[in-house]
Amino acid sequence: MDSSDWDERYAGRELVWTDRANEFLVEFTRSLSPGRSLDLAGGEGRSSVWLAERGWDATCVDFSPVGLDKAANLAAARGVTVTTIEADATSWRCEDPFDLVVMLYLQLPEPGRARALEAAVASVAPGGTLVVVAHDIENVTSGHGGPQDPSVCYQPDDVTRVLGDLETIETGRRIRVVSTPEGPAEAIDTVVVARRPTG
């Protein structure tokens, strides 16, 4: 899907996704001191808004201007400010690295996935943290929801092999419980958290 496809998907007044922060983002940022954050391929901005509410200087990058407009509106409704940048996650490069970089559910096939991950890694400042969460390939056959195309689903190694000098804090598969009309169901996510050394 290109940016016009996502513009069309985001065109309705309601949010396509929930306005609640991802549980793994909450878990892994709880102990961090607020600084500058980047949400790469941030869509409608729910992660950036949540971070801004907690004192982060939040930036949301996405290639859909319609999604970014909704991010700005959500920020305004919550009484916070989020910087929005219209750019493609597979080619964007930052000039001033961030204390926290998150990339959540950017489901791309290779080679776009590797390019986006490399952009995320390059955006992490010394001492900064990277959080990557995505629908795992095992979710296609054993989990609930998410894309059913294995080529856009992740494995932890897809992320760890492009981390460079970042030190891994956690890498693996995590279960995320989701609500359905039939009751709770389990989704399987790839979750990788890493930190760039200060020295």
Image (spheres, rainbow, N blue to C red):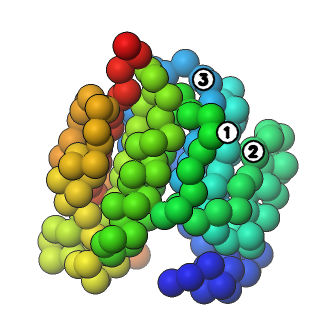
User: Residue under circle 1?
Assistant: 58
Q: Secondary structure at mark 2?
A: loop
- Above or below, 180 against 198 in this view is below
Mark 3 or mark 1, which has the lower sequence index?
A: 3
User: Residue under circle 3?
Assistant: 34
- Above or below, 9 against 196 in this view is below
Q: CA distance from mark 3 to mark 2?
A: 14 Å
Q: In the rendered structure, which amino acid carries the disc numbered 3?
A: Pro
Which residue is drawn at the image coordinates 51% and 40% (left, top)?
A: 123
Q: Is residue 83 left or right of residue 116?
A: right
Q: Secondary structure at mark 3?
A: loop
- Where residue 76 sits: x, y (%)? 84, 49
Q: Secondary structure at mark 1?
A: strand
Q: In the rendered structure, which amino acid carries the disc numbered 1?
A: Ala
Q: Is residue 45 left or right of residue 182?
A: right
User: Residue under circle 2?
Assistant: 82
Q: CA distance from mark 2 to mark 1?
A: 5 Å
